[in-house]
Amino acid sequence: NGGNGGGVYFEVNFAPVIQIKIQDTTIHDCEAITNSSSTYPQSGFGGGIFLSGSNDYDQTTDTLDFSGMLISGNTAGRSGQSMYVAMTKVKEWCKKGTLGEFVKGNYNDETSDESELEGIPLSLAGFNSQSQSYISDNQRHLEYYWDSPRGQIWHILNKYLESLIGINKPGCAEFDNPCNTIAYAILQISIEKGSSADAIIPEKKIGIHQGGYDLTAPYQFSKSNSYTDCVKIMKQLYGTTSVMEDQAELKIIKGSSGSAVESGNQGWISAIEGIQLRIYGIKIVTDDTTLLIPIIYIEGETSVLELNTVTLTGIDYISPSNPDDPNPERFIRGLIHIDVDDSIFIASGCLFKDINIDSGGNTIRIH
């Protein structure tokens, strides 16, 4: 095998109906050694397993099931410390089932080194005929294929960062191919994960690109129009090993003190119908105009608001009020306002500074 597959070497013709199933099998302390001999065009791939062959794998069958694979301590001279896959439909295999379940065995998306499982969409003949530089440039961690977009995050960017700006088009999501608006990203998650615009997806993740995002009009999340129970707004690649270092900036653009953009809205970001809103690693600022509605407004029974490492800074706010009402306090709104009793509010690692509030409001108000 020329130094590929230190533990197991599979060379498969995928045209006939075959089945390879790994159950409760441990592959550990195996090594694929790089062989400089010209007899072997490629070597040092797949410390534990090397899988390749001819013809196309059919993802509609149960041909390959590595769910029972247990890997540890394997090494490879080049790539795929525990497994390397060279087959034309490697991406399709990784996407079969849920998050690579038929590929990764005991590989853990959160804690395992991504170099454990790697591959390239080439047949064995194509793999052996390519240069090492081509393989290095075109191979991927297998997690890249099943966790696409990375972290299941749809990124948004609506202002130029150097030459990059988000574009609303099918396939936008990755930080280097972001969407342009929140609404489009919310829609695309249902289409791409549920195959229809109104497919209900339990959780939707919206990533604020490191270039920032300008919120030019209030936006409302609800179970009925967002088709989810939970929206998470987070900084670029949050929860992955490539997460951006600083907070991502969300800037509220009111435009002018006379702007009517807030009229008829309960908050710049509002969540109703009991939808969960969770925000991670975001810095919220304004264009220095005075706000007349809350930045975040939550309404609905069993609602959840979580703020994790969120900063609000440099904000001027005048709370809505009605001095002629017998109970004027019921109109007062906090800059962050939760208008329900049966709710959960979680805040950790947050910073609120340089906030000026008039008309009796608060930074946080649960009413």
Image (spheres, helix red, strand yellow):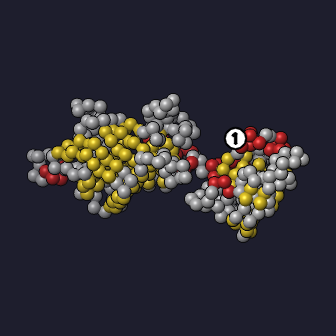
**The quadrant where residue 109 appears:** bottom right
366 or 274: nearer the eye? 366
| 202 and 65: which is toward the camera | 65
- On the picture, is 52 further left or further right than 70? right
Q: Tell whether 224 sits left or right of 128.
A: left
Of 203 and 69, which appears nearest the observer? 69
Horizontal arrangement in the rendering, residue 82 relative to residue 354 (left or right) = right
- Residue extending furthest toward the top: 163
Q: Residue at the location (31% across, 47% down)?
A: 312
Q: Judge the density around disc 1: few (<14), some (14-19), many (≥20) Cα neighbours within 10 Å.
A: few
- Image vertical order of residue 28 relative to residue 313, above or below: below
Residue 14 showing in the rendered view: no
Can residue 249 be seen here? yes
Residue name at image x 44 percent, y 54 percent: 230
Outermost residue toward the front in this view: 36
Quickly name the residue at label 1: 137
Locate residue 228, reporting x and y percent.
46, 52
Which residue lies most toward the right here? 39
Local SS, label 1 = helix
What residue appears at the point 49 percent right and 47 percent down from the top-left corner?
A: 244
Which amino acid, mark 1?
Asp
Going 31% across and 63% down the picture, which residue do you hit? 342
* Relative height, residue 70 to residue 199 (above, below): below
Q: Nearer the viewer, residue 321 or 1?
A: 1
Image position, residue 333 (x, y; %): 22, 50
* Image coordinates for residue 219, horizontal then vertical, percent: 36, 42
Q: Quadrant of the N terminus?
A: bottom right
